[in-house]
Image: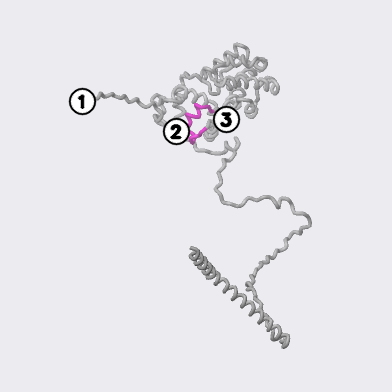
Amino acid sequence: MCACYRKAAHMLIQLRNYALLPLSLSQAKSTNRMHSRATSIKAEMTSSEQNPKSESDIRVFVRRKRSRKPQVITETIVKVEPQDQKLTSLPDIEEFAFKKPEINLPQRKSKPIMNNNDKAKVKVKPPSSWVKVLEGIREMRSLEDAPVDSMGCEKAGNSLPPKERRFAVLISSLLSSQTKDNVTHGAIQRLLDNNLLKPEMIDNADESTIKDLIYPVGFYTRKAANMKKIAKISLLNYDGDIPSTLEGLLSLPGIGPKMAHLVMNVAWNNVQGICVDTHVHRICNRLGWVPQTKTPEDTREALQMWLPKEEWVPINPLLVGFGQTICTPLRPSCSLCSVNGLCPSAFQEATPKKVSRVKTKRSES
């Protein structure tokens, strides 16, 4: 056993030597190489000291870097011509104002603003056969059986003095907005019975009392507050009277163009324009007298372009009564209208006939 162990140990030692042999050989080679290199350098140094070379024989090798090609930058010099004006002072601030870029965009065509004088000068061709239509409406309205004939705003305060009647017409016009004539007439009668149709009495009355008397007119709460404001303005600025100009009437709270023109016509006998309400607006569009306007004010402006001025006052009660009896907002009675042959809207808004549905019973199989 001991011999075997010795033999194995001897073999391990030999294997270790074999593994370390290449490393020792490479170290020996590198050592010999360094030794020979040092010997050669020493020999060269000694030889150079014995036989010194001239400066011309010595060559120095330097690694040069590649030089990039220089970029040529061209500069354009702009000559500035001298201005005619000499800058003797600081420039004006307007020279530095912001200027919008010039872009060709489609511009909205704005409606030209025209006053009443310019509108009167504009000549518009009246619609064809309007005279025959107007005569036919007068014949149908000859009975004067419409509510406007007996309960219109112009009928308010007929028995009062002129100053009080003007104020009554103004209050009646205020209450007539979006309210039927019979409801407005009833409210005016209740105010008159309670002695509340004078500016000083309305100013001293409670707003709740006025609301109770004018109910059920449309927007009675707001109209009661406007009545108090109008009474205060009438007492302070007009000595209990109403404004005598169209601009003054339009400045009052709750008074629009339709009411202002009506008050000017009835109270002051001053015709400034046509009084156009919903009935006049609707009928003029149905007859084709105006180019399909959207608001009563547009209808007034278009109608005044061609309608003779002597017809401006009677056209309102004429068409209002016609709209209350025959040419109603819903289901107009075109069959009863004598001018339906001249109306482009005749029988277009009539009530369609109801189609009876017959129920069929399925036969039992």
Q: For the residues carrying marks 2 and 1, which lies nearer the camera in this image?
A: 1
- Is residue 48 visible in the rendered structure shown here? yes
Nearer to the camera, 245 or 175: 175
Image coordinates of residue 184 in percent, x first then y, are 55, 18
Q: Which mark is residue 129?
A: 2
Q: Secondary structure at mark 1?
A: loop
Which of the colour schemes (rainbow, by chain, secondary structure, one colour) is used?
one colour
Q: For residue 279: magenta? A: yes
Write the residue at 70% across / 52% down.
96
In the displayed orientation, state which residue is furthest to the bottom: 51
Measured as percent of width and height from the top left, residue 257 is found at 58, 29
> Quadrant location of the C terminus?
top left
Check disc 1 and give the amino acid type. Ser
Q: Is residue 207 magenta?
A: no
Which residue is under mark 3?
Answer: 273
Q: Which of the marked residues, 3 or 2, is nearer the chain's N terminus?
A: 2
